[in-house]
Image (cartoon, grey):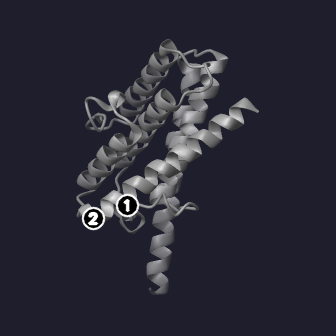
Amino acid sequence: MGLLDRFIGRKAQDEIGAMIRELNESALREPNIQDLSASTAVIWNTLCDGATDTLSQLVVRNSNNRLDWCLKRHRRSISHDQLLSMYWWMLLYQLLLLQHRGLDGRITKNDLSSLEVTAHQFLERHVTEFSFPVKPNPWSNQWNRQFALEAAMDIYNGVYEMLGLFNDLNKRINYVSNFTSATEQNFDDRVNNLRD
């Protein structure tokens, strides 16, 4: 790889990293905009951190080898629209992990419903504010009834289709399995930090 290629690659990495941080900052404003309770805001912020970390590891740089879908070499071709879809999917995925893995009795159906509304309001506001031509859809109409592995498989397929990438079915199984176990572990670690 030549010096120019490395420079262009580093520039693309920095740009997409900055876009992810902007999406995260935008999402972190939702508790104030929507007047969420302090406890719900803490949970929302934790979900945002999880979504940001997961997406950053997938497309910028990963510290956990299990969070690698071979997307980094394509980051120059990821548009802001596509990145918004991916970030929002990661938020919904974090919400799905919360639904299944829980938070020691601190989460009720009303909390989950409120957080889901917050995620949809974030998307609506972001799409309107930045005049996106199309509002993203969840990866599946039944996303909030899926288990983590099933959701991860659909997200992986959706990302590869959205980016127009060849989906190697043999590699996909390993990528999705590793992603699921890594994100579940990361979620549990974040929740444990909330308890401390």
- Residue 22 x, y percent position in the rendering: 53, 44
Residue marked by disc 1: 174
Relative height, residue 15 to residue 51 (above, below) = below
- Residue 102 x, y percent position in the rendering: 55, 27
Q: Nearer the viewer, residue 82 or 61?
A: 61
Q: Give how far apart the Cα atoms at labels 1 and 2 are.
A: 7 Å
Label 2 residue SS: helix
As drawn, the label of residue 170 is 2
The answer to whether marks 1 and 2 mark residues whose Cβ atoms lie closer than 8 Å is yes
Q: Which quarter of the picture shows residue 2? A: bottom left
* 68 sits left or right of 105 in the view: left
Label 1 residue SS: helix
Name the image quarter holding the N terminus: bottom left
Relative height, residue 114 to residue 97 (above, below) = above
- Residue 82 x, y percent position in the rendering: 33, 48
The residue carrying pointer 2 sits among few (fewer than 14), some (14 to 19) or many (20 or more) residues within 10 Å by Cα, namely: few
As drawn, the label of residue 154 is none
Q: Residue sitting at 27 percent across and 35 percent down?
A: 140
Question: Could you tell me if residue 128 is visible in this image?
Answer: yes
Question: Could you tell me if residue 21 is visible in this image?
Answer: no
Q: Residue sitting at 38 percent across and 59 percent down?
A: 175
Q: Nearer the viewer, residue 15 or 161?
A: 161
Q: Nearer the viewer, residue 125 or 92?
A: 92
Q: Looking at numbered disc 2 in the image, what kind of residue is underneath it?
A: Asn
* 101 sits left or right of 142 in the view: right
Q: Residue sitting at 26 percent across and 51 percent down?
A: 162
Relative height, residue 112 to residue 139 (above, below) = above
* 188 sits left or right of 196 in the view: left
Q: Nearer the viewer, residue 30 or 145?
A: 145
Q: Determine the residue located farthest toward the top in the rendered image.
A: 110
Relative height, residue 177 to residue 24 (above, below) = below
Q: Determine the residue located farthest toward the right in the rendered image.
A: 196
